[in-house]
Amino acid sequence: MEHPKDVGDRTTLAILLSLREAGYVVSLPFGENMRYDLVIDDGARLARVQCKSGRLRHGAVILKTSSSYAHHASAIQPRRHYKGQIDYFGVYCIDTGGVYLVPIDDVAPTCQAFLRVAPPRNSQHRGIRDAARYEIARVDLAVRARAKQAPRATSGAR
């Protein structure tokens, strides 16, 4: 199982690459504990982006739209939404290879949102958030592990 930090780093890289290819200038904030991971510049304005790893479940990419602080001993709020602190969620789903740019105003201030990649089985269309509407790129950053091999010794080495 991969360390969550490695998953997050791969997600950020996929989103960063996709935003650059889409024509945005991308800046990285200095320091930790910011509510956003990237700043994008489209030539007219700056916008804050929070990067999220999406999970494919039952035909939809699920993204967490709030941070959990329940693991902190002195947590006043167990969950904090990003409303007013970011402009977009940048989402990368390794299962679909899709990178999505979702405006914060398009998701409710709950704990998760769904981007539908397959039609619902009940044929419902109302209230469905179609992933294609938000997709900005497809990226293949799947990790393919290779067995580690000892470096070969050169003929003149002792």
Image (cartoon, helix red, strand yellow):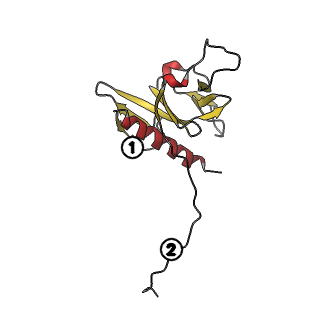
Amino acid carrying label 1: it is Phe
Neighbourhood count class around disc 2 (C-alpha, 10 Å): few under 14, some 14–19, many 20 upward: few
Q: Is residue 28 left or right of residue 89?
A: left
Whether the residues at callouts 1 and 2 have beta carbons within 8 Å, the answer is: no
Whether residue 31 is situated above or below residue 124 in the rendered picture? below
Spot occupied by residue 92 in the image (x, y as percentages of width and height): 52, 36
- Confirm whether residue 83 shows in the render: no
- Confirm whether residue 27 shows in the render: yes
Could you tell me which secondary element the residue under label 2 belongs to?
loop
Whether residue 103 is situated above or below residue 50 in the rendered picture? above
In the image, what residue occupies the spot 37% across and 32% down?
A: 22
Q: Residue furthest left?
A: 43
> Which mark lies nearer to you, 1 or 2?
2
Spot occupied by residue 102 in the image (x, y as percentages of width and height): 49, 25
Name the one closer to the observer, 140 or 45: 140
Q: Residue furthest right?
A: 122
Name the one closer to the observer, 3 or 96: 96
Sequence-earlier tag: 1 or 2: 1
Which residue has dot 2 on it? 151
How far apart are the alpha carbons under marks 1 and 2? 37 Å
Spot occupied by residue 2 in the image (x, y as percentages of width and height): 62, 50
Q: Is residue 46 left or right of residue 127?
A: left
Which residue has dot 1 on it? 30
Q: Which mark is residue 4?
A: none
Whether residue 129 is situated above or below residue 149 in the rendered picture? above
To which quarter of the image does residue 81 belong? top right
To which quarter of the image does residue 29 belong? top left
Whether residue 129 is situated above or below residue 97 in the rendered picture? above
